Image: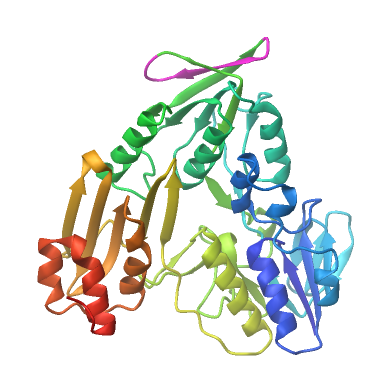
Amino acid sequence: MRHVIIGAGPAGVVAAETLRQSGRPDEVFLLGDEPEPPYSRMALPYLLAENVGESGTHLRHGNAHFQKLAIEVRNERVRRIDTSNRLTILENGHEIAYDRLLIATGAHPVKPPIRGMNSEGIENCWTLADARRILAAAKPGSRVVLMGAGFIGCIVLEALAARRVELVVVEMADRMLPRMMDETGGAMIARWCESKGVPVRTGTRVTEIARTNGNLTLAVDEGDPIEADLVVCATGVAPNIDFLTDSGLECGDGILVDHRLRTSIEHIYAAGDVAQGPDFSTGGREVHAIQPTAVEHGRIAALNMAGIDTPFRGSLSMNVLNTLGLVSSSFGLWMGTEGGERAVAADATRSRYLRLEFEEDRIVGALALGLTQHVGVLRGLIQTRVRLGAWLRKLREDPNQVMNAYLECTQGSGR
């Protein structure tokens, strides 16, 4: 049997390795469309901060790693899929037949439709090629504008600040991390960044970018224009599904998959940022574009491709972020549920914030800021759906007791 995997990111690599570890003597092809060894996009900020070299972004080290596992890695772009004849059609016109196919093509950055967005000096931070251009341009003292203060934007913010540039952050939403933090948490992070010397302009939309004599000028809808030597755009991503237009695969925001990561066509699976799969909290199907989900998708899809029936419980919406030394995290239904209850503890002077969302006597979502020890506890309580019993009342009164609640409810050793 021949397995073909399109996409050489974390989902694809883990899937290829899992297929080989299943013990079957099948052929395994891993197709990546960049001229690089398989690497992690989440490692690019560490490259920008010069904490690692390029090899530090690679998912696996050693030239012979994939060869030893009999995984054939090819740098090829897939133009389309012929699902009737089980063929992948490459850009160069060649074809690769498959018995089982995994689509793990990830996502691509989306630039807003602003005049001048294609000017020289405006970069994404999505590929190694992008990172190389940013490294060349973002020298100490360079004027850099970061467009977008979502999860990816704030990771890039940390890396750019480490390069000692003159950084300004522009976010069109009313707060930083609008999909991860509420107004209280987003405002605390913005104040923290300001205290570290990074101006943040939320509620600000860039309307045009002009390049004159090597300088970039960003016109905005509120306030004075911003001058820059470099603009880094982190305004969102979208799944790579355009090449599937005539494939017959059912798609929504991404490729729709079931609890075995199967698509609407039985012999085709999808994993990672391109897959719209089961959501642990809601029971619906969502795209969760985070590396832990991609890795788990890849593992489970591969087991099912190999004939080892393995259900997927659903992915938990989860983000943990360090922004200039301030750790923030969000889990599950952090925005709450209809008819649910909420407990909040906030200390703006210390940049501490904890918000718990309850449904009946379970925690279903949480936000935390400046509370690193709570990360594993909150995730554990949500994923295990632990009943709090008498601890529900105690946590409503003081959510900071969540560690004791966890110990008591899961191990019987709380105080």
Give whichever of 228, 138 is nearer the camera: 138
- Tell me the quarter of the image containing the C terminus: bottom left
Query: Is residue 124 in view from this perspective?
Result: yes
* Colour treatment of the image: rainbow
Q: How many labels does the image show?
A: 0
User: Quick check: is 216 in the magenta stretch?
Assistant: yes
Query: Which quadrant holds residue 377?
Result: bottom left
Residue sitting at the far top = 213
Q: Where is residue 221 in the image (x, y as percent from the top left)?
A: 40, 20
User: Quick check: is 189 in the magenta stretch?
Assistant: no
Q: Is the residue 241 above or below the residue 340 in the image?
A: above
Query: Which quadrant holds residue 306?
Result: bottom right
Left or right for 390, reference 154: left
- Tell me the quarter of the image containing the N terminus: bottom right
Give whichever of 241, 17 is nearer the camera: 17
Give whichever of 114, 21 is nearer the camera: 21
Q: Position of residue 85 (x, y in %)?
A: 79, 75
Q: Is the residue 16 above or below the residue 79 in the image?
A: below
User: Which range of residues does the magenta coloring cover?
Assistant: 213-223
Which residue occupies 38% across, 67% down? 376
Q: Where is residue 327 in the image (x, y as percent from the top left)?
A: 39, 50
Q: Where is residue 248 in the image (x, y as percent from the top left)?
A: 64, 67
Q: Is the residue 395 above or below the residue 227 in the image?
A: below
Which residue occupies 27% across, 79% down? 386
Query: Is residue 202 in view from this perspective?
Result: no
